[in-house]
Image: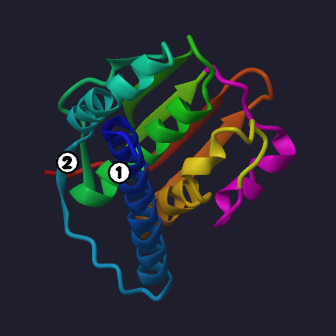
Amino acid sequence: LSPEQVTEYAGLILQGGKNLLRLINQILDLSKISAGRYELRRVSVDAGSVLWLAKDAFEARAGEKGISINADDCPVGLMVDADENAFTAMTHHLIENAVSFTQEGGAVRLAVTKVGGKIKVAVSDNGPGVAQGDLERILRPFEQGGRTTTDHAAGAGLGLTLVKAFSELHGGALAVESTQGEGFTAIIELPAATA
């Protein structure tokens, strides 16, 4: 094998290992949540700052597809009462889905608002969307659908399931909205920090 082939194969093996580790960690998290053994370490987390950092983390990947990520509606200072690691994981899952399923040249929009005693985080894209009949189904473990199947290779259909489980564990909720051909929006609603 040439050095280039060895480098390419090593890269594929590394990526496969990372995908497998991610899948195992997602299954472990879901198992802990289902068994009531996932302990939240709740603190006041700046939701806007987490989204700006997440935007930075996904910009290179989005840039490869010519996708823009807009976080202008993510003001800093809106504090959510959450486990910071879980909250960061939730935002990353949603942004990763949006970038994965949005076509080249598309757009992803992030937003944070405070409504009463709740913080709402929305991740929207202008991708192909999901049929109304699939919206409930895609929240279940290992379910994918409604969009193209070409981007499913890297995921097992656990991202939205985890976001929903983490949201409910925090006393919040996950809502999904879509019209086929007109994009997809996921909204996390969590308690606002009181202090």
**What is the magenta range?**
126-143
Residue beneath disc 2: 45
Residue 97 is situated, as x and y percent measured from the top left of the image, at 54, 40
- Name the side, left or right, on which 87 lies relative to 154: left
Q: Nearer the viewer, residue 144 or 189?
A: 144
- Mark yes or no: residue 25 visible: yes
Residue 51 is situated, as x and y percent measured from the top left of the image, at 30, 34
Q: Is residue 137 magenta?
A: yes
Q: Is residue 72 placed above or below 38 in the rendered structure?
A: above
Residue beneath disc 1: 10
Q: Is residue 158 placed above or below 37 in the rendered structure?
A: above
| Residue at (56% x, 39% y) in the render | 186
How many numbered marks are there? 2
| Residue at (68% x, 37% y) in the render | 177
Specify the farthest residue to the right: 133
Q: Which amino acid, by three-letter code, is at mark 2?
A: Val
Q: Nearer the viewer, residue 115 or 42?
A: 42
